[in-house]
Image: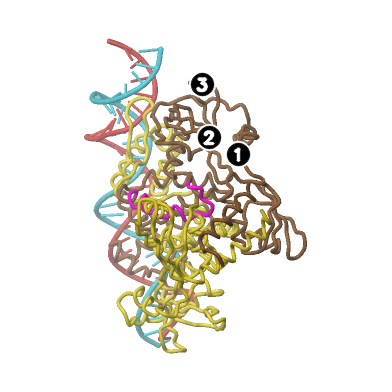
Chain colours: A brown, B yellow, C red, D cyan
Amino acid sequence: MTETAGRLLSLLSLLQLPREWPGSELARRLEVSPRTIRRDVDRLRELGYPVEASMGAEGGYRLVAGTAMPPLLLDDEEAVAIAVGLRTAARQAVAGIEEASVRAMAKLEQVLPSRLRRRVGALGAATLPVVLGADGVTVDPEHLTVLAWAIANRERLRFRYSAADGARSSRHVEPLHLVPSGRRWYLVAFDPEREDWRFFRVDRMTAPTATGARFAPRALPADDPAAYLREHMLGRASTYAVVATVHLPARDVRARFPGVEVEEVDERTCRVSGLDDTLEYLAFHLLQLGCEFEVHEPAELVAHLRGLHDRIGRAVGPG
Amino acid sequence: MTETAGRLLSLLSLLQLPREWPGSELARRLEVSPRTIRRDVDRLRELGYPVEASMGAEGGYRLVAGTAMPPLLLDDEEAVAIAVGLRTAARQAVAGIEEASVRAMAKLEQVLPSRLRRRVGALGAATLPVVLGADGVTVDPEHLTVLAWAIANRERLRFRYSAADGARSSRHVEPLHLVPSGRRWYLVAFDPEREDWRFFRVDRMTAPTATGARFAPRALPADDPAAYLREHMLGRASTYAVVATVHLPARDVRARFPGVEVEEVDERTCRVSGLDDTLEYLAFHLLQLGCEFEVHEPAELVAHLRGLHDRIGRAVGPG
DNA sequence: GGCAATGCGGACAGTTTCCGCCCTCGATTC
DNA sequence: GAATCGAGGGCGGAAACTGTCCGCATTGCC
């Protein structure tokens, strides 16, 4: 049986390559008779993976899109590519699929052979700073998978934390949720030492590790962790609210400046407003539009842009 | 058998979740006896997928990293997350794994159910402009998968092309290689109408489609397609060579400005040099370092920075 | 220390399934 | 029309699977 099941997996793996396979060649490769191949193909179809066949000479089998995802059979490099892709996506907290990214990452990391893990680590480090608006602090994808594991497994979590005011502490908490917020990730956890719920910014954690000790999850005093987080953050987060006029059609701005509200003023002008916690991010995004603009708020952003202005002036010297 | 093989896949799927499963629960879920579960676990191990078991109460099975990648069983959202992650990675042409990214993308897109494909498309469009240094022209990941398919399947390819000088043409070529170069992708193909080899920038293609017509691949007049491309591009590419002094330790610059040479001047200063074909990319990366710098070459970059300088000046008004 | 939960694995018997070998048929390409 | 491919029915022997026994080891909790 192990033989039959293994053969089915190999068959799936072959059929996932972007080409067509004549039954005779599959039979040669898998060392069974062509009749068995036909039966295997039937089995795959029965399992819900649509194998399409073209008749006639030059014909062959290939796997096509069906209603369910078939198991992905990846070679080493593809696995590394996927891991790296997920890391960049998680680091940018791509809107709408943050949790899924982390879940997929956790799933992949759980089974990723160590030799590949090393390659992912090396590549991940090398490609980190391509992200726009990096203020030097980006979340470590490794941390996210550790947290996801601890949450799913209800294991206590130990880490060191640098609070916003710079105070460092050692924590030992019961993790409950991982919440993306803008470009940040927050851990919602119960801190038994302080006997209360706490929020931790993942990029401020150092060396989080699941301790293996199980705990019975407590009920969060709110239905929606994200709402609870927002409520808690309100007022204490150092976020900047930007309001600016941009001389570019609203359609273009929406396409190129994600996460902000865009309001049309006229065909060639619009007004953007939005929130972020770093001035760099806002400034670069406005500049990146490549058009004229005016910043109305906040004063800090104006000051930041003046700083940039002066810095560029010093960099290129007098005109 | 279909049943046994299907059960093994379900088992793999369960074991890939980040938790432990007692055999009794697996037996309940898969509707077989615990003895069969033990045998299934053995089968998985025999296939090379290491299932670890913890003894004692609170024990259970889980899949751990082995020497080979097990088939990944993804739910809808995870599949979407992976597709989106690969797209961002491919768009940025993350160094060293470009081809693997495209291969994995092609594999995934081939079997991605259409309802998920739509979600990926929507998300991909929304997240496009986060990339730094976008000059508005980024490669469409969809194109890459079409090209990869055509190359692997030796099918002729039809597309419309806008050359660097703006001339538009309709092409019908025999694709041979997909070569990443910097942040660009190039297709190496034989053009039967012109009876010679041609290079096409993927982001300048419109609506590439594989025609289904097969061809016998010709030998490229060079061993390495990448080298052949470089040779061909030499002199005709509009690339800018930057030389700048940056007032930041060389170590920091290397970590935050990928793809350029960094040479230490003293502990707080270094000199960077590199190539790129857009001024925006170079300018933003220099600014993003957040430190003082001087640009020595090229004159175009200095001019571009002056433009930025003036634009910021107009944006924030007189100090 | 005992109990309960967990995993491990041998033996057996009945049933099912698989596999290779025949065969015919339909579709497609050259 | 010939060659090549997929689809699928039937047959018989061999192999595999499954459930039910059984006793064993390990771990955590009371």
Q: Please tell me whether residue A198 is drawn above or below residue A74 in the rendered image.
A: above
State the predominant SS element of the stretch in magenta.
helix
Dot 1 falls on a residue whose secondary structure is loop
Q: Please tell me whether residue B66 is drawn above or below residue B161 in the rendered image.
A: above
Labels 3 and 1: the sequence-earlier one: 3
Callout 2–callout 1 Cβ contact below 8 Å:
yes
Dot 3 falls on a residue whose secondary structure is loop
Which callout, 3 or 1, points to the residue nearer the camera?
1
Distance between mark 3 and mark 1 Cα atoms? 24 Å
Labels 3 and 2: the sequence-earlier one: 2
Evaluate whether residue B288 shows in this view.
yes
**Horizontal and vertical percent position of residue B93:** 44, 63
Quadrant of the image occupied by residue A255: bottom right
* Callout 1: chain: A
Residue A295 highlighted magenta (yes or no): no
Q: Please tell me whether residue A49 is drawn above or below residue A58 in the rendered image.
A: above
Which residue is identified by label 1? A238
Which callout, 3 or 2, points to the residue nearer the camera?
2
Q: Residue drawn at (56%, 50%), measured in percent from left and top?
A: A280
Distance between mark 3 and mark 2 Cα atoms? 18 Å
* Callout 3: chain: A
Q: Nearer the viewer, residue D6 or A158?
A: A158
Labels 2 and 1: the sequence-earlier one: 2
Extreme residue in the right direction: A266
> Are discs 2 and 1 both within one chain?
yes
Which residue is identified by label 2? A164
**Horizontal and vertical percent position of residue D29:** 40, 17
Which residue is identified by label 3? A194
**Horizontal and vertical percent position of residue B278:** 51, 69
**Horizontal and vertical percent position of residue A146:** 42, 38
Dot 2 falls on a residue whose secondary structure is loop
* Callout 2: chain: A
